[in-house]
Amino acid sequence: MDAPDPKRAASLNFLARADQAYRPFAPIDLPEFFAGRREHVRRLESELAAPGRQVALYGERGVGKTSLARLAYFFLKRDEEQTHFVRCEKSSTFDTIFRDILASAGVEVVLNGVEAEGERHGTLGYGAFGLGGTRRVRRSFRRIVGEQQITPRMLLEQFAEREGLLVIDEYDRVREEQTHTRTAELLKHFSDAASRTKIMLVGVADTVSQLIRGHESLGRSLAQIKLDRMSDEELAEIIDRGDSHLSARTKNTVAKRIVRLADGLPYFVHLICRHAAHFAAEQLLGPSDPHVVIAEDEYVRGLSAALSNAEHTLAEQYSQAVITTRRPSEKFMLVLWAIALSDEREVQVKDIAKNMAFFAGDERKPATFSWNLGELSSESRANVLTKVREGYYKFTNPLMRPYVRSQMELENILYRDKQWEFPFMR
């Protein structure tokens, strides 16, 4: 048998560590890779330390809500065995949500009360959301007689005296109004009883009222924590932590470009850095033993690969928006690029016209592209834009602006010889 190639082994090890540090396709599950958000963590600790206080964590898509929710038990110093996490679907109901939580806690709701032994599958290190690997935890499942519904009383009996945390993620996906009403009642019961187990609702919303469907009576018991986009400093911290874990160095100019493209959304930092790091691993296969540097070449190749492997809905929506009769339409693309160029997320039509001149050389009259704006705000063009109010438009999906900006940056590098100086990259 041939001896293992140490260079190949070093490269594979580097790739594995890159996939630990940069997680565009899954939430962060280790505290050492969680960057920024210190003020939000402090608020979470403060609010949940208050008797009777529950928490709603909300914000745009892509800002890292699930990563913070997954690690909340760690920051709050709660027992991971008493932390129960459930992700909602459109079809989720109050009973299905809390039946899953009860099952995670070792309680199965059935018609006949019997004792049973069960196993819970977890992971090593930091618990259910920790390091790779699996373990089996023997857990006694106590079956209780089922009622017509899972009730607040039943849940209080199981959790009120535990130092636990119930995390309900993607709560915005729940459609059934009765589920929102019953969840509001449950939150009130847990608060009134000063339950030691706390409930954390997590979801996409502009306001907490959107998340809880107008149940304003929860104002006293439900703390509102909005997760905004990350600052440039917080995004740069993701890259710094990745470099430290990889024993690599990302050139300062490259790090700044990645941060500027990300538009405050950690998803894009993780996406571009992961692919750039994969190309940087090739350095370990060379004749020398280099200190790995992620420079311009790795950045460009990583950016191209990142766009090819981005969330598939982004590529699909972008293609549907700009392609006409199987060919990209310059007018549709120009409108999207002009909106992405703006510093404002809600862009006025007159500014779209000015920004189009940045690419086309002459300013267009709004009347020449008003039809395109209407089409881009329609189902036929994937609703890629939303008309906010008269004369103002924005990208419907917040991830679309950094995606379009990345497309602009890549084309500028590959085909335009960097003749454009985008204001957002300064």
Image: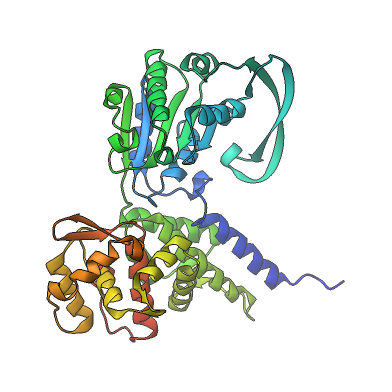
Q: Which colour scheme is used?
A: rainbow
The image quadrant that residue 111 belongs to is top right
Query: Residue at 42% across / 21% down in the picture?
Result: 186
Compare residues 215 and 82 and report the one nearer the observer. 215
Q: Where is residue 366 in the image (x, y as percent from the top left)?
A: 13, 72
Image quarter in which the C terminus is found? bottom left
Q: Give the quarter of the figure containing the N terminus.
A: bottom right
**Residue at (43, 77) in percent of width and height:** 296
In the rendering, at what x and y percent does residue 210 appear? Answer: 30, 38
Circle count = 0
Looking at the image, residue 357 sits to the left or right of residue 330; the answer is left
Q: Which residue is drawn at 30% across and 75% down?
A: 333
Q: Residue at the right extreme?
A: 1
Residue at figure coordinates x 27%, y 61% from the top left: 377
Percent position (x, y) of residue 94?
Answer: 48, 28
Task: Indicate the quadrant where residue 212 lies.
Answer: top left
Residues 407 and 18: in front is 407
Q: In this view, does 304 lie above or below 386?
A: below
Which of 242/315 is in front? 315
Question: Can residue 262 be seen in this snapshot?
Answer: no
Whether residue 285 sits left or right of residue 411 in the image: it is right
Instruction: Find residue 255 and report its horizontal and vertical position in percent.
Output: 39, 66
Task: Residue 391: tell me if it is visible.
Answer: yes
293 versus 109 height, above or below: below
